[in-house]
Image (spheres, rainbow, N blue to C red):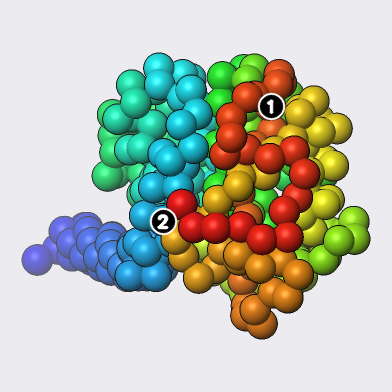
Amino acid sequence: MNDIVRNSMFAVGKKMKSMGEKLITRSRFLKSEKEKIKIFQNETYQQINNARLKHLASLNLPLAGKTVLEVGAGVGLHTHFFEELDCKVVSTDGREENVDDMKRHFPNRDNRLFNLLDFDSYASFGEFDIVYCYGTLYHTPKPGEILKGLSSLSREMLLLETCVTPGEHIGIHLTLETESFDQAIGVVGCRPTRPWIMEALKKYCGYSYVTKTQPNHIDFDLDWQIPVKKQNHRAVFVGSKKTIINPLLLTELPDFQERN
């Protein structure tokens, strides 16, 4: 075997080894990403997602056939709710890994990357009848700017579910979160008070409402005068560009709520 052939075979072998190492690394990376994304599919998530969507359905809001911008979609486990109402949905998330997962599992959907802290990108999405922001606002450090931006994309309603801090004061309460695919991208989140949210929605949407009922899940408080000591306190709000006449939507914050 001459030197030319020997060197050529050595080069090919070296290249194949390199390609093999890259494939192994990529395989390990994908496995790692899949393990992280599985957090969205555990029993805890399934329970709260079911409670959220059943509650939203019970509000009897005019959602059928609307255009919807879903922000903080995670891996797209809420989107079917609007699809079943013949809505045209754009599903977005701030993590590229989550968007890639949505594209793999739901290739027929319009899945896009949308970092809510990239305020210059908001206008590129255009306007929608409904902006859907469930389980997302509290994972950000700038809730006011985000609600202002999202309201500018909504022609009719901004549907909001978020963790809150109990109390009658006005505040956003910044907090540190763990590094996870379901937490704040920049580690810093917030837990605004209910009065702060009502004030912000009224400022940016025109009209603000809190739901009379709460989803059937322990995270959603019923007694706001003496709240139960626990990690998460959640509530559901609606920002609207016009007055909504609905007995299940309140303009004043109640001290007590009931299950839907």
Q: Position of residue 94 (x, y in %)?
A: 57, 47
For the residue pair 117 and 31, the one nearer the viewer reads as 117
Q: Residue at x 28, y 34 (%)?
A: 107
Q: Position of residue 27 (x, y in %)?
A: 28, 65
Q: Which residue is mark 2?
A: 51
For residue 178, side relative to residue 83 (left or right): right
Among the 4 quarters of the image, the one containing residue 7: bottom left
Dot 1 crowding, Cα within 10 Å, few <14, some 14–19, many 20+: many
Question: How many labels, in total?
Answer: 2
Dot 2 crowding, Cα within 10 Å, few <14, some 14–19, many 20+: some
Among the 4 quarters of the image, the one containing residue 32: bottom left
For residue 21, side relative to residue 172 (left or right): left
Q: Position of residue 44 (x, y in %)?
A: 39, 70
Q: Which residue is mark 1?
A: 240
Q: Residue at x 49, y 37 (%)?
A: 59
Q: Can residue 148 be seen?
A: no
Amino acid carrying mark 1 in the image: Ser
For residue 4, side relative to residue 163 (left or right): left
Up the image or down, 188 lies above or below 69; here it is below
Amino acid carrying mark 2 in the image: Ala
Among the 4 quarters of the image, the one containing residue 118: top right
Q: Position of residue 197 (x, y in %)?
A: 78, 47
SS of the residue under disc 1:
strand
For the residue pair 84 and 226, the one nearer the viewer reads as 226
Up the image or down, 113 lies above or below 121; here it is below
For the residue pair 14 and 2, the one nearer the viewer reads as 14
Which is more N-terminal, label 1 or label 2?
Answer: 2
For this orientation, the residue located farthest to the left is 1
Q: Can residue 171 be seen?
A: yes
Up the image or down, 92 lies above or below 50; here it is above
Q: Residue at x 9, y 66 (%)?
A: 1
SS of the residue under disc 2:
helix
